[in-house]
Image (spheres, rainbow, N blue to C red):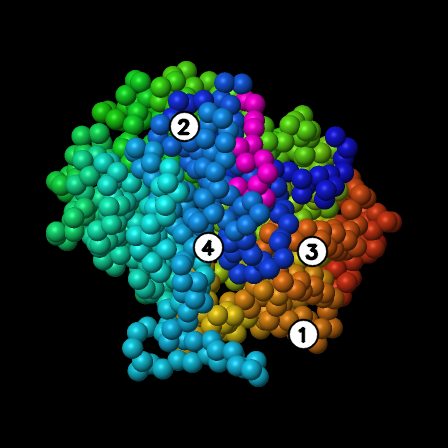
Amino acid sequence: MSRHLSIDDLLRIRYPTESVPPRLSPDGRFLALTVAPAVASHEPGTSGQFDARNVPVTVLGSELTVIDTSDGSQWQPFPDAEVSWGGQWSPDGSMLAAYVVMGGPACLGILHLADRRLRLLRNALVRPFFGFELPVWTPDSRLVVAKLWPADEAFLGDRPNSATETSASDIVVFSHDPDSHGDDQAPVQLLNERYGCDFGIVDVSTHEVRRLAEKWNTVGGWRMSPDGAAVAVPVIVGQEVAHQQWISDLMVVPLGGAEPRAIAHGVTFDYGQSFSWSPDGAGIAFTTSDLPYATGERPKGRLFVADAKGRRQPLDVSADVGDDLRQAYEHPRWSAAGDEIFCLVADGVWCVCADGSGARKTDVDEAKTLTSWIQPPDDQVLRAPADGSLALLLRDTTSQALEVVSIDGTDGSSKPRTVLHKRYVARGETLGLEVDWRSQTAYLQLEATEHPPEIWRLDLTTGEASRLASLNPSLQGQQFGLKRLVEFPDADGEERQASLLLPPDYVDDTQVPMLVVVYAGTESSPRIHSFGLRPCLCLADAYLFASLGYAVLLPDIPLGPRNPRRAIPRSVVPAVDRVVELGFADPKRIGVLGHSYGGYSVLALISQTDMFSAAVSSAGVVNLASFYGALSVGGDSSWLGWSESGQARLGGSLWENRDAYIENSSLFFLDRVTTPLLMFSGNDDTGAFAQASEAFSALRRLGQRVELRNYRGEGHWPGSWSEPNLRDVLDRTIAWFDEHLAPNTGSTGSSDSGCWTDATIPEAFERPTRTQSGRETRPAADDCPQGRDVMGRCETPGSSV
């Protein structure tokens, strides 16, 4: 492969569609996998959550692919479809149900495997929002349960109590009456746009569609009872605005047409996934994601067992559990006998008695983090390999390698199976795997530095792992860069890690320009074995930068419950210092970039340090006070909860914690910025352009180099934008860093004293000045070469900022 990876190369890479789990046919022969290109073209009429064909924006461009597990060959079950996703095999293995777009709106499609005959049920228009909301078959393979497009489409536009009205004079009115009936703080518009649906069943023989419930807001999924007579599904009934938390009733819906019944009220789910039926169908276990306390700390999620007929209050069975049982995408799983329930936590597996009489925990090695158990995504009963052990995926917290181990459920002993320098790719614990228990084989979505996500086969008996199928065979054998895991002490002396990517043709003992990708509150080191590390502006963009001669650094940036702005440089600055000390990066040519909260992180950094010679902030918030009240097009005030108890970590309202809003807003400190700043915003991203405008106006007033590019019709993340606009973002980012960091002019190092003087700056690189690059000429130290201006000095790693 040539050194230069083009934007074309980047955008052609195919990935498993996020959140859509692979599904294995009952005989283990075929694996249905939904894939999509890195960038999917927007169709005309795309706005909000769905495009004009009723396709959720999260799966645009997706195509269902079937992999033959016997030889790894691939075929398309719906070759003429514009979009297809969410394949689900019938229990008898004769049919594949999926969501299909072919010359009309998204509908249910049925492929008959025997003759590859396709039947589009155009009277069954579907409306899933998340990728994991798959169609569900009844055990007899006759009926499919799905979220349907509402018969009354006006439901999707209803705005009760906080109405948006458009008159002939184009006046948009938002109104709130605290004395009116109902809770007009609930973002009804967003709720209906995302999750609004009818809930029904489709007879695949007669093509009859029967609506079991209308005008529901459901999120997550629905699970079939063991006898196939009913499904359980969470239905959103309200919201705790200050905590960004949906409140749901857990409903049981009889398929025979009887009235749905609520068996648990006011349940706090994350993504509506964490519930399961007992093997006898008498009970349903569910875990909660309880609301945070006023301090910002979350109470422990609990495990309940509800009576499936709703005859009594759910029983809290987790009194003896010492851990948080909150599950975002995973669900509790029952023992085959129905007397025990198993839950995953970060460091082990809890086994809880279904009657609440006790609980025990099987711990994993304290140096490991539990990634997932090896179980099919939808199974409600926990199953084990032939030897009776429990197969787990672990991550070594030092090497970040993926390990497969077997845990003995009786004594807790573990047996290593295999170690892979790869990363398991899944939004939720089991959303990236499948299991064939008959052949004792698991299929995993794995990625590595050298290849994008692909399907690997794991023998549960021997632990042997091998590639089954690649989605991008043309990339095999190509080099994208050299990775390093860098350890460093932060400003408080805590040991941290950072992922470092060097250019593919990096020469030892050469210092190259470096880009620091930041996103505060996350650890990037666990992604050292991932393809492209952590994406910023688009998938795998770190490889694009590395191919152009840049090193790319992604430091871990942990945050406490409060004051994020001051905490961010306390991890980032020491990480950069450490990489410079190791001789990889030229301290005069360091840039920083970030998206979303990473964009906020960029603004926090450049307002507190002059370390960076150029910066790029995408969708970054600069003024938390003004962002607090930002309204969406539909009138939702969703950033209230984000600010008070969410990612912003402000601990209360603007009036309760006024000083915190100011202290954590970089707008009030932009007079300290000397770094040239490039900003991106999507015009349809609530508040993004307004925030970028505030930063632009302030820096222009202060006489600093700043550029803002706003893109009409685009949302939050450039990686999901139209291809022309994403290309512009990448082209301009590269040009910006090329201008200010002058790549392709490697430096061989500093003076022995660690000082950077005007003598060591390559002639091709313009000398930094205070107003141009943010690097400040500093007085010479005693041990610096005499007769030269000191342009920068390598500070002691771990020094305070």
Q: Is residue 430 left or right of residue 66?
A: left
| Residue type for callout 2 | Ser
Going 37% across and 53% down the picture, which residue do you hit? 219
Sequence-earlier tag: 3 or 2: 2
Which residue in the protein does label 1 denote?
697
Residue 662 appears in the picture as rendered: no
Please, what is the three-letter code of the amino acid marked with disc 4? Leu
- Residue under label 4: 559
Eyeballing the image, is 557 above or below 660? Answer: above
Q: Secondary structure at mark 4?
A: loop
Quick one: label 2 or label 4, which is nearer the N terminus?
Answer: 2
Residue behind mark 2: 94
Image coords of residue 476 (percent x, y)? 65, 27
Residue topped by disc 3: 725
- Marks 2/4: CA–CA distance: 51 Å
Which tag, 3 or 1, sits closer to the chain's start?
1
Compare marks 3 and 4 and give the one earlier in the sequence: 4
Q: Which residues are magenta?
A: 72-84
